[in-house]
Amino acid sequence: MRRSMALSIILGILIAVCILGLTPVVPSEGSAKLTPKAKVIMLAPNVKDYMRVLGGPPETVTMRSGLVVLAPGKSVGTHNTETYEEVLVVLEGRGKMLITDGPSLDLKPGAIAYCPQRTEHNVTNTGSEQLRYLYIVAKAVR
């Protein structure tokens, strides 16, 4: 049940990304044509720290994603989204997304946290069990 809910959330996010107007990168003249293929990727149940899910071109147009597992008290480290938007889909555990000079977002199963482009942030496990979440980033286009 939890896995199907998470997959439904992920699908909803991907549809929302399309609706929000992200456009594919058009290859320059002479470059290989980008044709991502539809597929299903199974999230491994025993990931210790990280599992790459989507790696960007040629697998996708701009999207990248991964499964992150943080032990209690651990964090991913402060980083910046640069030109990407980021969404976290929390699968298990509790944590916080700490936005530099901004809010602290509570993370729990079923929560989806959005981080805009050019935003410095960190994710920390604040619970007593592992925090498992899927992140999805896509190039922001305006």
Image: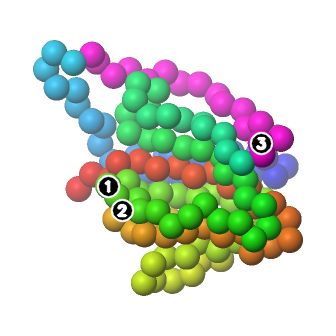
- The reply to whether residue 47 is in sight is yes
Looking at marks 1 and 2 on the same chain, the residue that comes earlier in the sequence is marked by: 1
Which of the two marks, 2 or 3, is nearer to us in this view?
3
- The reply to whether residue 111 is in sight is no
What residue is at 64 percent from the left and 74 percent from the top? 96
Q: Secondary structure at mark 1?
A: loop
- Callout 1 environment at 10 Å: few (<14), some (14 to 19), or many (20+)? some
Separation of disc 3 and disc 1 at Cα? 28 Å
Q: Position of residue 67 (x, y in %)?
A: 66, 46
The residue that disc 1 covers is 83
Q: Nearer the viewer, residue 14 or 120?
A: 120
Q: Which mark is residue 4?
A: none
Tell me, yes or no, whether the highlighted magenta stretch contains residue 9.
no
Q: 24 above or below 109? A: above
Q: Amino acid at mark 1?
A: Thr
Q: Amino acid at mark 2?
A: Gln
Magenta stretch, main secondary structure class: loop
Q: Amino acid at mark 3?
A: Val
Looking at marks 3 and 1 on the same chain, the residue that comes earlier in the sequence is marked by: 3
Location of the C terminus (image quadrant): bottom left
Dots 1, 2 in contact, CB < 8 A: yes
Q: 40 above or below 74? A: above
Q: Is residue 25 left or right of residue 90?
A: left
What residue is at 60 percent from the left and 44 percent from the top? 66
Q: Which residues are magenta?
A: 32-48
The residue that disc 3 covers is 47
- Callout 3 environment at 10 Å: few (<14), some (14 to 19), or many (20+)? few
